[in-house]
Image (tube, rainbow, N blue to C red):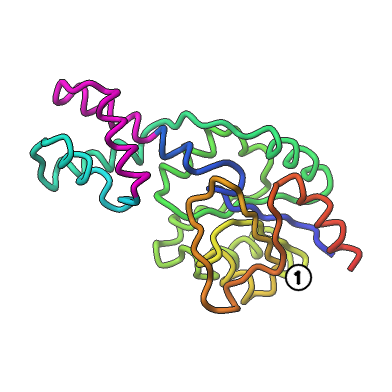
Amino acid sequence: MIKTVVFDLDDTLYDEIDYCRSGFASVAEFLANLLKLPAHKTFNTLWRQFQAGNRRKTFNAALDELSIRYDDNLIQELISVYCNHIPKINLPDDSRDVLVELSGKYTLALLTDGYLPAQQLKVQALGIEKYFKCIVYTEQLGRNCWKPSPVGFEKLLKTLNISAETAAYVADDEKKDFIGPNKLGIVTIQIIRPARLHTESAIKTDALARYKIYKISELSDLLINIKSA
C-alpha cells in the first residue's frame, strides 16, 4: 500500500522551460546593464539559441551571434546570474490541486537534483515547501549522489522511516530518474508533460517507470488503483 508520494521538481510539478525563460531574462538584463545592450534583443538571441538546441553552450552561441567578445570569466558570471536569479515561475493550478488533495491522504516528499541555490529558489518561488514533510536536495549529499544514484532515495526512506514498497516516486526523465528508486523497490511513475525538456528514451529496462501518466491530475486515481491492485 502506498503511504508516501515523492515528487521530482522540474518538469514534474511545473514546466522547467518557464524557469529557463526566467533565467535568460535575468541574464539579458545583466548584459543590458553591463554592455549597454537592448535587453529584449539579447533575450531573443538567448532564447533562439536555446530553442535551436544549444542547451550547454547557450551563452557562448548567443554572444557569438551578437558579435560580443567574451572570455571564460564572463561565461561563468552569466551562469552565476542564471543559477542564482529569483525565478518568475508559478505553480500550475492542476499541480496545486493535486498537492492539496494528496497531502490529506499521503505523506508527501520532494527529491530533486541540481545546483542547490537554484533548486531552493524554485521551491520558494513556487510556494510548495509547506506540502512536504521531507525535501531532499541531492546536491547537499554530493554531486555524485545526483540521480541515477539511489543515495538520495535511501536518505529519504531513512528520514521518513518508511519502507521502499510503501513509497511512490513521480518524475519525468526516463534516462535517469527511475534507476535508483527501481533498484530500491519504490513504485515509479513517469509524468509526460507536453512541454518537458528531456524527451530521450531509456535504453535499459531498469530505467523505465512502472507506470505512466500524461497529466498530473491523473495521479490520484492511479495511486488508488495501485493501492487496490
Query: Residue 149 location in percent, x, y?
Result: 50, 70
Vertical placement of residue 144 versus 18, above or below: below
Give amino acid for label 1: Glu
Q: Residue at x 87, y 60 (%)?
A: 225
Vertical placement of residue 40 versus 103, above or below: above
Query: Residue 141 location in percent, x, y?
Result: 45, 60
Relative placement, left or right, of 34 versus 81 is left
Q: Residue at x 68, y 52 (%)?
A: 214
Magenta part of the chain: 23-52
Relative placement, left or right, of 185 versus 105 is left
Q: Residue at x 69, y 32 (%)?
A: 93
Q: Nearer the viewer, residue 150 or 225?
A: 225
Query: Residue 21 location in percent, x, y?
Result: 41, 35
Q: Main secondary structure of the magenta part?
A: helix
- Quadrant for residue 64, please give it: top left
Q: Nearer the viewer, residue 113 or 28?
A: 28
- The quarter of the picture where the C terminus appears is bottom right
Q: Give the labeled residue for mark 1.
A: 165
Query: Residue 117 location in percent, x, y?
Result: 41, 42
Vertical placement of residue 59 versus 8, above or below: above
Q: Residue at x 68, y 61 (%)?
A: 189
Relative placement, left or right, of 60 versus 12 is left
Identify the element where label 1 is drawn: helix
- Quadrant for residue 173, please give it: bottom right
Q: Nearer the viewer, residue 157 or 34?
A: 34
Q: Is-magenta flag for residue 101?
A: no
